[in-house]
Amino acid sequence: MKPPDTILGTNLVPAPGAVFSEAEEIAKLKDSLMKRIRRSAYVFRVDCGGCNGCEIEIFAAFSPIFDAERFGIKLVSSPRHADILLYTGSMTRSMRLPAIRSYHAAPDPKIVIGYGACGCTGGIFHDLYCVWGGAESVVPVDVYIPGCPPTPAATIYGFALALGLLEQKLKARHHKEGENEVVIPIRPLIPLRLRVALEREARRMSGYRQGRIVVDRFMSILGHEGANAPFAERMKAYLDEEGDPRLTEIFERLNDIVEGRPSGWTGQSSASSSTS
Amino acid sequence: MNDHVTIRRGQSHLDAIRLQYGAAIEDAEWQTENQVTVTVALASLPEVVETLYYGREGWLATIVANDERQLNGHYALYYILSMEGADRCFFVVRALVPAHKPEFPSVTPRVPAVVWGEREVRDMFGLEPVGLPDQRRLVLPDDWPDDLYPLRKGAMDYRTRPMPAAPAETYTFINEKTKTSTEVPLGPLHITSDEPAHFRLFVDGERIIDADYRLFYVHRGMEKLAETRMSYNEVNFLTDRICGICGFTHSFAYSSAVERALGIDVPERAQFIRSVAGEVERLHSNLLNVGLACHFIGFDSGFMQVFRVREKAMTIAEVLTGARKTYALTLVGGVRRDIHKAERLRILELVAELRRDVADILDILMSTANLEARTRGVGRLDPKIARDFSPSGAVVRGSGFARDTRTMHPYGAYANAPVVVHTEQGCDVLSRVLVRVEDVQNSLDIIEYLIDKMPEGPVLVEGFSYIPQRFAIGNTEAPRGDDIHWVMLGDNQKLYRWRCRAPTYANWPVLRYMFRDNSVADAPLIVASIDPCYSCCDRMTVVDVRKETTTVVPMKELERWGRERKDSPLA
């Protein structure tokens, strides 16, 4: 397979090193752009093959609740008016030429934003037969706004980054193992097999997120050392305090497992054959 | 292989076509209690489909082609009909196309609804519909090589990006009405705003005579992706990304299809949670469409107000799924999130607030004289055209047909939910807006009902195994109409074939009839009334058949003209 640039079959994309490598000049242009658009930036959206999720969240960013226009950011309907080009969606085969044309139509200097998972990298569609990848496969991208789709708040944050209003948050932390460092297993008082059984049941009952919260709570009550009252009483006190019938139901199911009672729900349908 | 099905609906239709076509009906098999697949002789395919469609109140759900050469040496075509009169069911007419002679008699001359499906079958499988008048491509880009068919098994790797075979953008637009071959210069196609689509309006002065359009600029090849790179559960997250607005109903339909094919009993609680999420999505999308209707009639403050209120629906989605969009909620066999006390109370609170806010806004909107003045009688969809093309959702319900897959073929927790299928008789843009408005109110009722009646039990089943070549249909009602998913399971932990049909696919073909005899200024409003994801006629080429001139009008200019009605861009 040939790299994207040669597949394009067009001379619209300059060869690498021809135009876009003039980094200094571009940096200078961008500087002057920043000065010029300090107060107001015009944004033009290019949908190159998205699912509309990004479009709708951009819309929401300009609706009364989030109101990006209060920062002077405004959507315009022609690339000729634009300071910022916002590429959404994975770059499809049919849209590559229009996408390049809109890039050339926007006056220099301009800021290009790759928006959403697809605009940044091609997302879930990155290597498909009608997809070229992210926006960067045909135009040079300055700022990425990731997310699927980015929330309106993330969108406004991305604009602020693009306009130099905010510094990018960059954080890195490296862990060095200490000399006598020991990894303490979580919940050492609960046997591993029981813990796995509880976690699985909690996930089946309440999903990966709430199930996790519930089972953590359950195990911390179960494995609480030095508590005065027996487990059943502590559990009841906690459930009374919460007053959530659904939580009570899940706790009872988990307690059944602790006490060795099989769960009533087999998860097996009469029609489907079982692997276990 | 399907002996687990004990109740068998659709028998009356089968008896009727057996009586009429006798030996042409080869085999019948039930996938679920309301899904039957009947194999017929290829030559009788058009007659059988026509009889079921017009004779027994069948509506087209979709067409599926499948490369079954590895299984039985043939290609297979599945014409899925939703039988909506007596004995409701999905009645699937299957015909085998020999591998050495890849052509089949086109059904389009008898049942126009299948036209897009058959054009797509030709693009993707290279099966030639003999007698299909429209010889143009539908899905694949204009510069795609002629003899490469992406969905044929073994035809190509899913990552292959062939060299352009033709100059890009060579699509011919057809003016059906005058029948004179108007030469339409292909102009600089410059799709740069919103969603890409290219329209040709054939006009006489400012009156639209006919319209044609080229879509599928965003064809990415999802169906190929699902059967090559993804496992069964991963496809749930792919289906979420079919549409940024109604993606959840797609993953709901997909997982239902797999569950039905395998006969999995999904926990009731999971079905309730899925249905709540589905209604939340219908809620925010219907509000969005009402807002767009405000925008296109020049009532922008109404548009902003609707968007303000709609944010509450987005918050419900966030409480329910953790995301405003792309919910990632379903798995095959259940859901990934539960509703506890905190979520339940918050959702009920938001629903109560929404009910108040929506009532206020709709009151203002409905008493705005502009709405009725701009939308009554505009974009008329004749009920006869609707019957011929099987559109769905507000488009068909605005023309008097009570089509709603939630009541036709109940799924999820809808069997007992208080679903009201609202219809209007006006056939115009106003009717479609009113249907949307009623749907918003009804969704709020349904969410409250489902939260209130939420049963106990788990939210997920595990421990089933996948059985190769089982297949079934999944159906859900998205905000714009019904989603239909057809899946066939494979033997390598991947789908053998997955076909998805979004409602807009069924609604596009009627658009040209809705355009006819309207003013060019109303075109954006008419497009918005079918709610094609987001009004995506970003740019129109207007061809004056009398003057034989071509003017290219940018969408925003047309939109502005639609709102202000002065300084015509055509003058």
Image (cartoon, coloured by chain):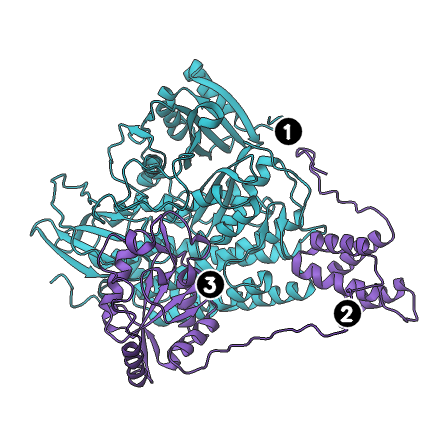
Chain colours: A purple, B cyan
- Compared to residue B509, the image places residue A97 above or below, namely below
Give the amino acid type for the residue marked by disc 1 in the picture.
Answer: His
- According to the picture, the residue beneath numbered tag 1 turns out to be B4
Determine crowd level at label 1: few under 14, some 14-19, many 20+ residues with C-alpha closer than 10 A.
Answer: some
Q: Quadrant of residue A102?
A: bottom left
| Image mark for residue A149 | 3
Query: Can residue B402 be seen from the camera position used here?
Result: no
- The kind of secondary structure element at disc 3 is loop
Query: Does residue B550 appear to the left or right of B439 in the view shown?
Result: left
* Label annotation for residue A182: 2
Locate the C terminus of chain A by quadrant. Answer: top right
Residue drawn at (52%, 44%), measured in percent from left and top? B254
Q: Nearer the viewer, residue B493 or B79?
A: B493
Name the amino acid type tagged 2.
Answer: Val
Q: Are marks 1 and 2 on the same chain?
A: no
Residue in the picture at 54% in, 67% down: B315
